[in-house]
Image: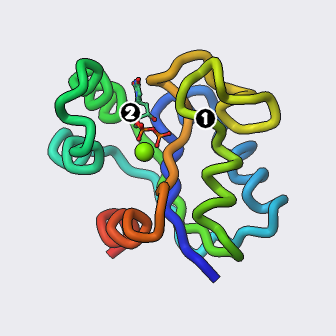
Amino acid sequence: MEQTLVIIKPDGVRRRLVGRIIQRFEDKNLTIKEMYQGVLTEAIAQEHYAHLKDKPFFPNLVNYMTSGPVVFLLLEGKEAITLVRQMLGATNVLQAIPGTIRGDFADSTTENIVHASDCQENATIEIQRFFR
Ligand code: UDP
Ligand code: MG
């Protein structure tokens, strides 16, 4: 079993998509181990996206991620990290295919509804950051 960290981003909460997103993970037989709603501080948002700090969109990304409440999910299941990334869809809005969360709901590469850990190393760090 693997664990991964998902964040339903501020636009996902504002658009009342929380229930439908969680439903998809449960439909795929993933287990919700822990879950809560909260607001990212600027410092934590900057830390979470530190690998992107030199990108031109970074300030906009931090503003967006701190713009309202988010929902944190600690999910568990077989190959959960890769599986959940597949369920999210591509980062680029035009490459996120229908049937994925981003493909079905996002119309922007920045405001793209959900985050999920992209590898085991980052899952460990991100679970520690938001659940420990
Ligand atoms: N992002 C953006 N513009 C880009 C690439 C990424 O605004 O050209 C934002 C978007 O919200 C994305 C986040 O930065 O989800 C993190 O980028 P990353 O490349 O890690 O994509 P992800 O892992 O979320 O698919
Ligand atoms: Mg990423």
Residue 127's disc is none
Q: Is residue 120 left or right of residue 27?
A: left
Which image quarter holds the N terminus? bottom right
- Is the CB of the residue bearing disc 1 within 8 angstroms of ligand 1? yes
Is 118 situated above or below 109?
below
Residue found 49% across the figure and 49% down from its top? 7
Is 100 situated above or below 106?
below
- Is the CB of the residue bearing disc 2 within 8 angstroms of ligand 1? no
* Residue kind at label 1, given as amino acid type: Ala
- Give residue 127's position: percent from left, percent from top: 40, 69
- In front of the other: 15 or 4: 4
Q: Which residue is mark 1?
A: 90
Residue found 60% across the figure and 35% down from its top? 90
> In the image, ligand 2 is in what quadrant?
top left
Is 29 situated above or below 19?
below
Q: Which residue is mark 2?
A: 68
* Residue kind at label 2, given as amino acid type: Gly
- Give residue 28's position: percent from left, percent from top: 81, 61
Residue 78 picture quarter? bottom right
Residue 61 picture quarter? top left
